[in-house]
Structure formats: C-alpha cells, structure tokens
Amino acid sequence: MKSILVTALLLAITLQVCNGEIFSALATLKKALYIEKNLANHLRSYVSLIADADRAKKVSELAMEYDRIADESLKDPETYLANPINAYMLCKRFTTELQAVQDLLGTPALQAAFEEQLSLYKHEMPTTEDFEGVIDAILRLQDTYEISSGQFVDGSFSKASNSPRMTASDCFEIGRYAYENGDKYHALMWLMESLASLELEGSKHSVDTILLHDYLIYAADDQGNPRHALNHAKALLQLSPTNQKTISRINNVINWLNKEILEDNEVLISQGQPIPSQFALPPVKNKRLMKRATTQEFKNYESLCRGEDVMPNPYKHTLTCYYSTVNNHPLLLLAPAKIEVLYKNPDLFLYHDVISDAEIEIVKGLSTPLLKRAVVNDPKTGKLITAHYRVSRSSWLYDQANHTIATITKRVGASTGLQMETAEGLQVVNYGIGGQYEPHYDHSVRHYNNCRSFTTTFISL
C-alpha cells in the first residue's frame, strides 16, 4: 500500500499521481538490453566468416562482452537501469560506439548484413537524443545531490546498485557534450577525469589526447585557470611536434595565456599576495555557474532533494497521527483513513496506505502507453513547449477509463472530504533518470481565479 500527500494551497483542485520509482522512461532502455543480447548472437554468427584472425577475435570478444552485460542487466533490468551510469553506457554503446562495431566487421557484405539487423530494431534503439538526455541527467544529479565526478567514475555515488568504472572515453564524451553546450564548469571537471583515467589506462588509449588537451586549454582558461591552460597547451605541442597548423595556433594561444598570467600576477602583487611558482600549479578553480540557483527558493529546492531540513517546524510538538472516518463516510467505516499531520499553516497531511500494489500496477499499465514529454506554457507565444526545467513524461487518466481509477478518485474524496466533481483527472508523471520540475506555482490564476481553495494530492507509486 502507498501513501498520499495533501497540501492546502490556493485556487483549485488537482489530483496528481507521481511515480517515485522509474518504470516508463526506462521502458525503452529496457528493450535495448534485449536488443543487445540479440546483437551479441548476430556478431557471434559473423566470426567464422571473418578472414582476418585479429578482427575475428575482437568481434568474438565483443559478442562475449555484450552477452555478459545482457546476462547481468536482465536479472533485474529496473535496478540496473536506475543507475544513471549503466543507462549512460548503454546509450553510448548504441550511439557513439555502434559505427566502430560495424567497421570492425571489415567486409562490405558483413557490414551490410549487420546494418540490416540494426534496421529491424531501429525504432526501439536508444538515439543520440537519449544519449544526450542521460548526460544531462547525470549533470543534474551531480549538482542537486552534490556528487563529485570522481564518485560517478568509480561508482561510489550509489550504495543501491553497482556500476562499472567509467573509462577515459566515457568521461570525455560527457566533458565534450558539456563544453559544446557552453557549460565549462562540468566540462572542466569531466575532461580532467578523462585525463586522469587515461593515465590509469596506460597504453590502452581510448581518447584522442590531442583533442582532449585542446578542450582542456579553453575549459581551464574560461574557468579562471590560465596556468593550467598553458600547461595543456604545452602538452598539446609535444603531442603535435610536426603539425605546423597546430603549432602556429597553439603558439598564439600560449602568447595570450602568458599575457593573462602576467595580468594575474600584477593583481596579486597589488593585493600583497605571493605569485605562484611557475613550477607548481595552483589548485584548479572551477566555480559552478548559478544562473537559476541564485534565489533562496532554488537553493531550498536542491536542499530538499538531498533530504535536508531547510526550515524549523514550530508546530512539531503538536503534530499527531490519527484514524478518521471523515464524517462517517461509508468507504472509510471498515478501513479508516490513516492520517499523519506534517505541518500546520498551511496544513500538510500524509495519508498512509491509500492505494494497493495491484492498483499501482493497473495505473502503470494504463498510463505507460499514453506518456508524452511534459510541456509548459510559453508566456511569450501562449503555446505549449518542452522546457529544461520540466523534464518528465506524463499522461492523464479519467474515471471513465477504468473502474480502478474511479475507485481511487472516490477514495481520495472520501479521505480528504473534498468534492471530486471539480477535480481534474489523475495525472501520472514519470520523472525517469534525473527528471525534475523546478520550483513553480502549481496553479493557473487565469483559469481558476474564482476558486477559493486549491489542493494538490500526490500519490507515490
């Protein structure tokens, strides 16, 4: 049985069913696990047809790796994919790495055969959009829960599920995506993780080190680290000693970095501070860009996500739990509502055990095929659009759809004493990996300006 949370606010009556666990956003990725298992079988069937022994060995090893991952993940797909790093790596295999797999087959005939197999799964395979969406989710989780990139890399960020250690290539893709989207804060930390992982991987280079240092020059400098940027520029010159075009460009970069360093030194001297030694790099500066996080409201939002207490509860000593039949409502005579008072002024209640596991499965089954990306109203155009601050998929269920939905609606009405005739349908919201809806007002003044009260009911599935 699950609980509902009722909060008394202003204006109208809305019912929302919010999914506390991931089931639909990962439904597509779950299919990809089965596809990967099938691809392992296809690759294995090509091994005997590959003349080159080295290629044949690599394809065989790749098929075994796909099999290993599929066998592990399919034991418990939901738990496996709830780990954002596992979801990231799955999407990466189906996007940035798939062409390399096809190239490994060697002959046009085998490549065409493999491409034909891929076409059968095209509509169920993760796309570049999915891959980038998972990266956005990782960066959002990192900020909200104050998780370091290193904790993601070694898998120590979660005790609930395990994830393999991320490679230099994994880190580089995240850093490059952040950089190309103007996010130098995340770009710098993830590109540095990539460089550190390269050193651990030794000769097994999975990243173009020239490109990596090139990105690091600009990411480091943009975040206020000209000395580190200079270091990467010099490293890049050592990696490209004969490329005249690169040498010319990087020498120009070195010149303006030296100029920046001289200006920094002058500022330090004017402040009476010591100048850093040219032989010892200062700690890396990497300040988070706080565009939306400047308000106390947003800071409270992230703190609440972390489970922190953001304000004292002056009514704590008066809070109670009790059973209620809510004016002897017939639906509650044999099973009274279990009510916990969480706050007063405004009133905030937690209703325990209001929906059964069987009802939850019915709600999931009815809503999953109807889920669509959630939208917001564009104040400039009045049109519905997707937005970065609302990342979820939602659908609406009405009493007419199924008697279980009608039963849930009646139960909510009975438990709260609210008139359900003016209520909206049940909105089922799936936030998936790193989903969110940033602080907002859960009402529309334009539509409900004649209403005296507004209540939102959340049911966690």
Image (spheres, helix red, strand yellow):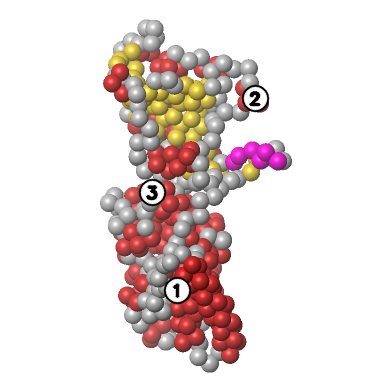
Give how far across and how far down residue 321 sits, in percent.
Answer: 29, 19
User: Residue 410, located in which quarter of the rendered image?
Assistant: top left
- Residue at image mark 2: 447
Q: Residue at x 35, y 36 (%)?
A: 309
| Numbered tag placed on residue 45 in the rendering | none
Q: Is residue 252 left or right of residue 27?
A: right
> In the picture shown, does residue 106 fall above or below 96?
below
- Residue at image mark 1: 228
> In the picture shown, does residue 306 fall above or below 336?
below
Given this view, does label 3 or label 1 mark the residue nearer the observer?
A: 1
Q: Is residue 387 left or right of residue 185?
A: right
Q: Which residue is drawn at 38% across and 67% down?
A: 283
> In the picture shown, does residue 288 fall above or below 405?
below
Q: Nearer the viewer, residue 458 or 449?
A: 449
Q: Which of 170 and 262 is in front in this view?
A: 262
Q: What residue type is labelled 2?
A: His
- Residue at image mark 3: 145
Q: Which amino acid does label 1 sit on?
A: His
In this view of the protein, can residue 125 be seen by the observer? no
Q: Earlier in the sequence, mark 3 or mark 1?
A: 3
**Where does the magenta region start and end?**
375-380
Q: Which amino acid does label 3 sit on?
A: Tyr
Q: Distance between the residues labelled 2 and 1?
A: 55 Å
Marks 3/1 in contact by CB < 8 Å: the verdict is no
Q: Which residue is drawn at 42% across and 73% down?
A: 275
